[in-house]
Structure formats: structure tokens, C-alpha cells
Image (cartoon, coloured by chain):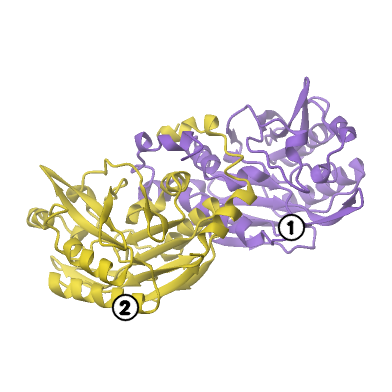
Chain colours: A yellow, B purple
């Protein structure tokens, strides 16, 4: 197996769980039809992005791994198509809940769960209200099509996450995302969002794929729009395919992970790391 | 003081120390004339890039801080012009030597020395033959014009270096460099080199300036060419000015560090870091 085909998808989410699962399934079928072996769906695609507001009612959306509708649905699809499918979900866990992802391998088995380490908080992104910061640590999974590392949305801003997943042996980094406008900060974060992940690719010599939702949602009379722009980079951080801010669909790219693993060795940056000099990373700084 | 003007320079280096110091001085005068307050000169500009080959003779180039010609020369210039001047030099230290930089503040005083942490090694970049990996740790300096962090060349490839300097309070990251063709690997590293530093800027919400030499040098019958392309990014990693691969000169950009420091707070990534989850950074991986 030399070349692995990786797809990133993007879609709008409605208030209807079944509709969202059906829309995701359509993208999975289409991208698998185009040869994709690892297919990335966006963050929390079962619902609208409920973190736009703080609502005690939405706490009920959280389900356990066993109860979650999308995971059960896509286990069958993954096995049937023979594709790797990480599924983002709101995970209920006793008295709290996490922003999690379950990795379904190409035989339909669940390889494990990663819980989002970094939780944002601010107007329209009230995630600290809904999620406890993840307790799993960063994880990578040996799938039928290479070793994948996954960061969830806000994780994508942290060089530590990308570095650790690469240290753990990741051959590609996947970032399911829900990001859009900043009605209060009033900035367009698109370029910043792309460059930070291009940087992870370049610094770790590893391809990166990001899948982000599209569409406008109105909750409590307040409107926010997600900007899509899902993309895939090569192993030096160049964006090799991307989508716009309006259309549902998928992009696909091929990688020879063995070749990239050798390119990473040849460039020598992992040989020349000095872990004993990095202790400040374990602090909040000056 | 709201806006700080930062310049990055690039030039060819000859086999003549006096010529190189004079060429660097010309660029310092010109960029100070254009209003620059922090002026970045390239790595080891006193000489040709001797690491192209392994030569016991070149070990003699190393001098102590007190003996180094360029540092003594530019202390006077820095004071006269009122500019901050980090000076890269080959530092002799007892029985070994480092690839170091001395930071001269705008009053001509030396604020301290940083010794390059990450030392590359490969055809045409035989640095492990000349330099012991630095023992100072990453450093930042409060200058007359803001707090600066400096990584030296290969350091620019390491997300840990950029993150730690930002954690220590850096308001801008400076990277003096000597990088060019890869006659054996036969790859063009230009884009990779830029994207990795753009990523540091984006991940740390901090401007980055890189100063790289130009020119072709022939040592032991082997030729290598440095690609210049010195650049400055804004605090989200976009390149806002850059040079070509042939011409000596400088670029200049203005930054309001207080505004950027607030932008960094507002975006929340430093608030949301989880140092207790980063222990793998202190290892060589799986």
C-alpha cells in the first residue's frame, strides 16, 4: 500500500439529527466513491453548533459512546465501504461531558476515543459551559490506512498538540472543526486559522486535513455563519486543495506516508530536538 | 511609544571580515535612516558560511564575546544610532565553541548572549562539527523597543523555541539565518522555510522577522547558493514584506506591540493551554 487517499468534507447542519446524519452519509459515500480511504467529517455534525449560546437544555444532547446515533450508524457504513471514519460527538460521562471523537476503523471497529484537550470560551463559542477539558491526552491510532492523529477544533491552534501527535507516530493530522464569524471581536480569522495549521504541517513534516462546517444558524435571535474553507496541506504545509465558504462537498488528496516518514527523517528536525531544553512548555510562562 | 519599526537585512558575505562588517554597517545605517529601531542582521555575517565544509582551520574563527570584532564595532554604532542590534557570532568558550548571538541595546550595552539550541548536520551544513548545542536555554530581552526573542537559523524549525520565547514574554521573534540550496537532498526548501515560521507567528500571535544571506560561495571546489528571501510577518503569520534571492537590502515593518499583546490575550489560546498535558514534548517520542 503506497498511496493513501484522504478526504475532508464540509456541510451545513440543521436542527434535525436524521437530516444531518443523512447529509454526512452522502458525503462519505461520494468521497469513498472517489477512492477516499480516510474520510474526515466536521465537528459535532449531528446538530447545529449549540455552543453559540449557553442553554441548560442542550446539556441533554450529550450521549455515551454506546448510545450515540452517528457512531452506531457510521460503524456499519465504515465496514461496508472499508473506510476509516472518525466521528465527532458530544460525549456524556457521568456527571459531566466531553467534546469527543470516536475513531472507526475500516472494519467497523472502534479503535478508541479522544477527548478535546483545549476548550475555547467566548461569545458564540461557549464551550467551557458544555465541555470539561479532555482527560485522555493526545492520541494516535493505527488504522487500516496509516497512523492518524486527531485534534478537535480549538486543538488546532496549539503547536503542542500537533507536535505530540507527531511524536506519538502520527502520519497525518486531522482536525474536525466548527469555526465562523466573530460577531463581537469582529475579525476574520480565516487566514490565521489556515496559517496556524499550515505551520503544524511544516513544523512536523506531516500532511494536515481540516474539515469545517458551513451555513448560518440563528439561536436566541443571534446569528452566526461558519466559513467552511476546509483544506488539506502537503507535508511542507502548502494547501493543496480547499473548498469555499458556501458549498457542501469534499476534497481529496493522496499521500505516500512511507515517503513522507523518510522525508521527516532526512530533514533531521526530530533528530535535533532537545527535550531537556523545553521545560518551560510545561508552564504558563513568565 | 506605540509603533516600533523593525528591519530585516540581507547581504552577500565575502572572505574578507572588514568588507563584511562594512556591508553590514551600510545596511544598518540605511535601515536606521528609514526609521528602524530594531535591526536584524543575518547569521554569522562576519565570514562566508564556513560550515559548508569540515575544516579544523576554521575552528580558529571562534572568538570570545570580548574579542569579537563585529560586536565591538556595532556597540558603537548601536549607541550612535539608538538602535537595537543583535549580532550573531562564532563564540569561543574554553575547549569548545557555540553559535551565538549578542544582543546590543540602543544604548550600546550588551544585554546578554543566547547560544543556538538546535544544531543541524548534513551535507553543506556541517554545524555539529563546529558548534556545541547551546546551553543558555531560550532567552528574551527587554530592549529600549520592546521584548525580543531570538532563535538562530535551525532554531526556526522548532515550534518549541517559538512557544517558549512567547511564554517568556517575547513581543517579536527574530531569526538570523544562513540557508540555501540542498545540493544532495536536491529540494527547494524556500516555501517550507517560510511556512514553518509563518506558523510560529500564527500559533503565538507574534510578528516574526527572518534575515537570510544571499550569494554563491565555493569552498573546496563545492558550490552553494543562499536564497535570501528575508521576510517579516504580521501577528497572524501573513508575510507583509519580503526580499528576493539576489539583492542586498532591507525591509521594514511597524508593529504596535501593546495592541498585539492584547490581541493575543483576546484570542484566548494562552488562557486555554494545558501544560499538564504536554509531557510528551519532553521526550523523543514513541
Tell me which chain the residue with mark 1 is part of.
B
A61 and A67: which one is in front? A67
Drawn side of residue B259 relative to residue A184, left or right: right
Query: Is residue A119 shown above or below A145?
Result: above
A193 and B70: which one is in front? A193
Q: Indicate the quadrant where residue A90 lies.
A: bottom left
Label 1 element class: loop
Q: Are marks 2 and 1 in contact (CB under 8 Å)?
A: no
Query: Is residue B196 shown above or below A230?
Result: above
For the C terminus of chain A, which image quadrant?
A: top left
Residue A242: assigned label: none
What residue is at 44 percent from the left and 51 percent from the top? A170
Tell me which chain the residue with mark 2 is part of.
A
The reply to whether residue A246 is in sight is no
Q: Residue beneath label 2, please?
A: A248
Residue B140 in the image: state x and y as whole percent. Answer: 57, 34
Q: Please, which residue is most extreme toward the top here?
A: B94
B82 and B112: which one is in front? B112
Q: Within 10 angstroms of label 1, few (less than 14), some, or many (20 or more) residues?
A: many
Query: Is residue B72 shown above or below A168?
Result: above
The span from disc 2 to disc 1 (Cα, nearest Å) is 41 Å
What residue is at 73 percent from the left and 60 percent from the top? B186
Q: Indicate the quadrant where residue B274 lies.
A: top left
Residue B4 in the image: state x and y as whole percent. Answer: 59, 48
Residue A270 in the image: state x and y as whole percent. Answer: 57, 43
Q: How many marks?
A: 2
Label 2 element class: loop
Residue B228: assigned label: 1
Drawn side of residue A205 relative to residue B130, left or right: left
Amino acid at each position: 500500500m503506497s498511496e493513501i487517499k484522504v478526504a475532508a468534507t464540509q456541510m451545513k447542519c440543521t436542527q434535525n439529527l436524521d437530516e444531518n446524519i443523512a447529509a454526512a452519509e452522502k458525503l462519505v459515500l461520494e468521497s469513498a466513491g472517489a477512492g477516499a480511504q480516510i474520510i474526515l467529517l466536521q465537528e459535532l455534525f449531528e446538530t447545529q453548533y449549540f455552543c453559540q449560546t449557553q442553554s441548560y437544555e442542550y446539556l441533554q444532547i450529550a450521549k455515551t459512546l454506546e448510545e450515540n446515533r452517528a457512531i452506531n450508524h457510521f460503524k456499519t457504513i465504515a465496514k461496508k465501504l472499508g473506510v476509516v471514519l472518525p466521528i465527532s460527538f458530544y460525549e456524556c460521562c457521568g456527571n459531566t461531558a466531553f467534546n469527543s471523537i470516536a475513531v472507526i476503523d475500516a472494519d467497523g471497529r472502534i479503535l478508541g476515543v479522544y477527548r478535546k484537550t483545549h476548550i475555547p470560551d467566548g461569545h458564540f463559542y461557549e464551550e467551557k459551559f458544555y465541555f470539561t477539558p479532555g482527560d485522555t491526552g493526545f492520541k494516535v491510532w493505527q488504522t487500516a490506512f496509516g497512523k492518524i492523529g486527531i485534534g478537535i477544533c480549538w486543538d488546532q491552534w496549539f503547536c503542542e498538540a500537533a507536535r505530540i501527535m507527531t511524536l506519538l507516530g502520527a502520519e497525518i493530522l486531522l482536525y474536525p472543526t466548527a469555526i465562523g464569524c466573530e460577531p463581537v471581536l469582529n475579525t476574520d480569522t480565516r487566514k490565521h486559522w489556515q496559517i496556524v495549521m499550515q505551520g503544524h504541517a511544516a513544523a512536523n513534516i506531516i500532511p494536515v486535513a481540516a474539515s469545517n462546517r458551513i451555513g448560518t444558524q440563528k439561536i436566541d435571535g443571534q446569528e452566526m455563519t461558519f466559513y467552511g474553507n476546509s483544506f488539506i496541506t502537503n507535508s511542507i504545509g502548502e494547501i493543496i486543495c480547499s473548498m469555499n465558504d458556501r458549498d457542501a462537498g469534499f476534497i481529496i488528496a493522496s499521500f505516500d506516508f512511507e515517503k513522507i516518514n523518510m522525508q521527516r527523517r532526512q530533514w533531521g528536525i526530530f533528530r535535533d530536538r532537545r527535550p531537556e531544553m523545553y521545560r518551560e512548555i510545561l508552564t504558563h510562562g513568565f
